[in-house]
Image (cartoon, coloured by chain):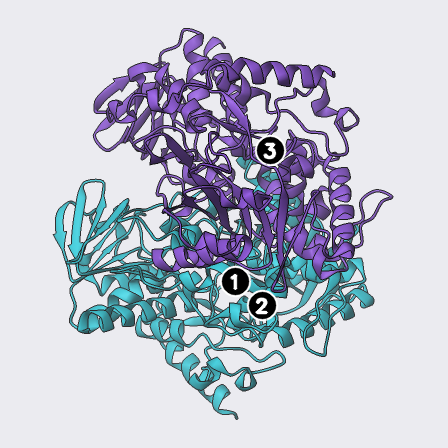
Chain colours: A purple, B cyan
Amino acid sequence: MTELSRRRLLAGSTVGAAATLLPWATSAPESEARPARGTLRADVIVVGAGFAGITAARELKSHGLDVLVLEARDRVGGRTLNHKIDSHHIVEVGGQWLGPEHDLPDRGLGDPSNYPTDDAVTGQSQIWKLARKMGVPRYTTYNDGLYVDYRRGTRSTYSGRIPTDTPAGAVEAGEAILAIDKRCQSVPLDKPWAAANAVEWDSMTVETWMKYGDSFSNQPFTGLQTADGHHLLTLAVEAVFSAEPRDLSMLHFLFYIHSAGSFGSLINTDKGAQMYRLHGGSQTIAIRAAKTLGHRVHLSSPVREIDQTQHGVTVKGPGFEARAKRVIVAIPPTLAGRIHYSPAMPALRDQLTQRIPMGTVIKVQCVYDEPFWRKDGLAGQATSDRGPVRVTFDNSPPDATDKHGPGVMMGFIEGTDGRRALSMSHAERRRGVIESFARYYGPKAKKPVEYVERSWASEPFTRGCYAGYFPPGVWLDYGHALRRPVGRIHWAGTETAEIWTGYMDGAVRSGERAAAEVRRALRG
Amino acid sequence: MTELSRRRLLAGSTVGAAATLLPWATSAPESEARPARGTLRADVIVVGAGFAGITAARELKSHGLDVLVLEARDRVGGRTLNHKIDSHHIVEVGGQWLGPEHDLPDRGLGDPSNYPTDDAVTGQSQIWKLARKMGVPRYTTYNDGLYVDYRRGTRSTYSGRIPTDTPAGAVEAGEAILAIDKRCQSVPLDKPWAAANAVEWDSMTVETWMKYGDSFSNQPFTGLQTADGHHLLTLAVEAVFSAEPRDLSMLHFLFYIHSAGSFGSLINTDKGAQMYRLHGGSQTIAIRAAKTLGHRVHLSSPVREIDQTQHGVTVKGPGFEARAKRVIVAIPPTLAGRIHYSPAMPALRDQLTQRIPMGTVIKVQCVYDEPFWRKDGLAGQATSDRGPVRVTFDNSPPDATDKHGPGVMMGFIEGTDGRRALSMSHAERRRGVIESFARYYGPKAKKPVEYVERSWASEPFTRGCYAGYFPPGVWLDYGHALRRPVGRIHWAGTETAEIWTGYMDGAVRSGERAAAEVRRALRG
């Protein structure tokens, strides 16, 4: 047994002991936290009660600082959110999965040769630490049976990681993924713009790379030749970024993959970022972590203005004004750009916030009496060349079996499909989703007990998921403004993370980093 | 004499008669317009007193509507601004040039075959109409003598439009421009995403096109082969977009060029977008036009919130609240995205505003006792492969001759150079600019009387110039949300124009279009 698997087992059994509880059900309603009113004071203010903000606040509090958290929504958890489907079960309508927690050796960061290669994973150590502290146990994502692939009007099933009904396409996509894994290791996580090929990669979209390849070292990639290889890689890009290959800078794509260790680490269920789920839902971690901050978390308190002087900061919103020595803004760059700052933001920082749009995804789920696809020997995962849903997962609760339910089929409407679906009516989307599910899992999919959807781009305090992404040219010219504090203002949020950027783990890391910055500044 | 040249001559002589005045000097100080205070009412509110907003307000007023204009800055004119250099002269630190006014036949818009080809220009008819109404006369941009080209440490001079010290590069850049002019005509101005090649072009950056070309119809372009061809085209792209070829979607690039008729129309001085200057400065048009709106223009009145109900809109800012039936938001998309809307913006519109960043340019000018380069037989225009200033113009006032001054040498620090220069001190930028000018025009450039700079990205109510641009993928998935009204909110601004987008003429056209929408809605 390796050290890694020992640790995994240990972690599993530790949290497993608590799994008989339904921890979300024991959480007090979040609405207890009142909106900020009047004039408030603290050592440090944190804007945003997602994983980044809550982590930063907890870190600072643990060092004796008085911290105030201002959250615009009426709940904590950022881009995670539980939705009750019956008296015993929730589904997550936002981020939900965790990957393995295997730690990276610290020294590995600056030196690509220390990185795991092949499909080894970079561990989500920081979110796991938090999950464990909060007593939120995990279970393994349901992944037994065959996968469905739907292409050119035909449905087939397969096992393994890549659909093999078109062997040439499968081989080509596999080769492209190997080429990507090789390249991504040359992109420094702390400064992607310093990669030897940074100018070439930040000058092209991922679509262009898929078409034309690049001149990387002595192992050039010459582009995908088959339509099936292109289709498979496109699907993987959409699933990871909720954006199209044409939207993304190739340099950003490689940075993001390096940040997670490998492409496989991002797209796989087994040993990848979709490996684990959490009893009571991912949001439970945030709800419990926020509780440790007590009455210092204010909900429904949107920050509209941040003023700073030599002596401190004043953070303003409707009906409140809060003063502190420092502030951590723990929201995505595009939303941070909508706060009014006085004095005005430096030009480079402001223009950065104009350039990191949020992805587009509508997460859709159908609740059934039972997970009927399991009886058919299917894992509930599908890939497809036809929308609106091109990727599915079995998202049934942990106590579901093929004998009793509820069964939950989940799908993502991503990128262009997501943008088109934004203009549809609820009924049209519902119909399209159910048609997609029936295409992959048969007529039983046509009669869900409930249809649940969440469009994150429609949420005023989120405006897109999973994360902000970098179009071409942004890393090169604006990258160094991403984390650099502006006076007394520090920046957190998963978009600012070096490791597992875009994920809950990255959010936690960004909160830790911003808290460390503030502590240094306050000591200084 | 053609109809076109007859009209030009006529226009020239009409406005020429007023040229003995210094119209800017007769304008009352703008600070007379007070900030909005308390509760205000109007039929229509216009947000922004640039050319788009002022035009929309004048149009509506001329039809008997009561219009209120709310401008965040303490002046009108948007991205145009006069700067006084002595008691008789100004220089413009923002947009300044107008191109020829030749009208397009209306029916030409939808049908590429009706478009001018070669280097024919699409006329800036609408801004000329306004300039004439406001009595602002024009003069021809100084353009006599040789141009300077600086490359690989060597300075040379040339005449004609493309530096010929590297003939292969000149030929190649010329061929690329012909290919661009051909392609741009296939991009419909009202819906660029409907071009036959839209997906291919919106999937690549301009840099990628320069490298790999495309598959357009039966005339594929295979990419630039020479470093000099690449350099020349890059310089032209930077000069037009104040962004790098890697920042821009090829589809957007072609749309923008089509919007002006041809690439030559954008980059040329003679018969191009830099052909004319205005006595008293371009801002004078806006100042005078705003005066016709009287006390209904409020300066220093930033709009922070727009609420709409079935019955009307409420527009709020610090210390004021204004109610109307409709509102026209006449500011760039990225700034429009920073207003707080209630109810929240539809997701597609919101995500659009996350995706149209402003270009980056610092406009720099040195004032000298005389335009000494004229005596050396130089036009004052330079192209260079070395920053910070890679493009210059003679920007001396109309009464300057080679015998008396003042002489004004102007340069742009654009794209990556501009972004880097944002982090420099004023003294560092000044030194770099003067070194650039001395490199092109000799040691006399080293002793300016005054150094004037304007960084538009640093302005809180502008945040970049010349205009917002579209990275890859944005036109395809978000284009139809650009102009579409949201309830009682209409969108104007040069970024929304179909003709001469990015220019003053486009701004005027967008104001006319938005005003027409509002009138239809109010009649309806």
* Residue drawn at x 65%, y 30% as measured from the top left: A271
The answer to whether residue A204 shows anywhere in this view is no
**Viewer-nearest of discs 3 and 1:** 3
Measure how far apart labels 3 and 2 are at the Cα level: 35 Å
The image's mark for residue B180 is none
The answer to whether residue B404 shows anywhere in this view is yes
Comparing A279 with B295, the one in front is A279
Which residue ends up furthest to the top in the rendered image? Answer: A64
Left or right of A260, for residue B468? left
Badge 2 amino acid: Ala
The residue that mark 3 highlights is A273
Residue at mark 3 shares a chain with residue at mark 2: no
The residue that mark 2 highlights is B198
Res. A177 image quadrant: top right
Residue at mark 3 shares a chain with residue at mark 1: no
For marks 1 and 2 on the same chain, the one whose residue lies earlier in the sequence = 2
The residue that mark 1 highlights is B476
How many other residues sit within 10 Å of disc 2, few (<14), some (14-19) or many (≥20)? many
Q: Chain of mark 1?
A: B
Badge 1 amino acid: Leu
Q: Is residue B64 above or below residue B47?
A: below
Which residue ends up furthest to the bottom in the rendered image? Answer: B1
